[in-house]
Amino acid sequence: VFPNPTTDYLTINRVNEANFQPFFYRIFNAGGTLVQTGETMQEVDVANLSQGIYFMEIGEKENARIRFVKQ
C-alpha cells in the first residue's frame, strides 16, 4: 500500500493476484471505530479522513491488515 503517509489516495499493489477482481476494504481509526468501507480495484480515496493513524482490512475471508498514516 502506498504512498504511506498519504493525503488523498492509497494504491494497493496486488502483484501476486492473477485475476484482478474488485475487493472489499474496511478502514478503522486508531480507536478501532469503522470509519470507511468500500469496494475497489486498486485505489482507495482517503481524502475525507482526518489526519491520524488508520488500519485497513482488505478482503473478505483472509483479511490483510495494513497500517497507514493520513496527513
Image: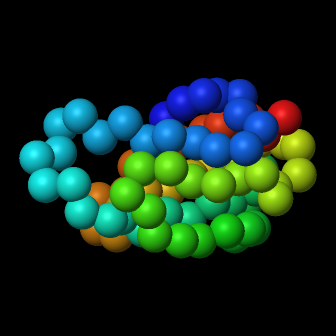
- Please provide percent x and percent y for residue 12: 43, 42
Examine the image and state in which quarter residue 53 appears: top right
- Image coloring type: rainbow
Is residue 7 toward the left or the right of residue 23 in the image?
right
- Single out the residue that lies furthest toward the right: 50
Q: Is residue 10 above or below residue 36?
A: above
Question: Visible in this render: residue 28?
Answer: yes
Q: Residue at x 71, y 28 (%)?
A: 5
Q: Residue at x 63, y 60 (%)?
A: 27
- Please provide percent x and percent y for residue 54: 71, 47
Quadrant of image for the C terminus: top right
Examine the image and state in which quarter residue 63 appears: bottom left
Q: Residue at x 77, y 38 (%)?
A: 7
Q: Residue at x 77, y 52 (%)?
A: 47
Asked whether 60 or 32 is in front, the reply is: 60
Is residue 20 toward the left or the right of residue 40 in the image?
left
Q: Is residue 48 above or below residue 2?
A: below
- Please provide percent x and percent y for residue 38: 53, 71
Question: Visible in this render: residue 31?
Answer: no
- Single out the residue that lies furthest toward the left: 18
Is residue 10 toward the left or the right of residue 59 in the image?
right
Examine the image and state in which quarter residue 34 appears: bottom right
Q: Is residue 70 above or below residue 57?
A: above
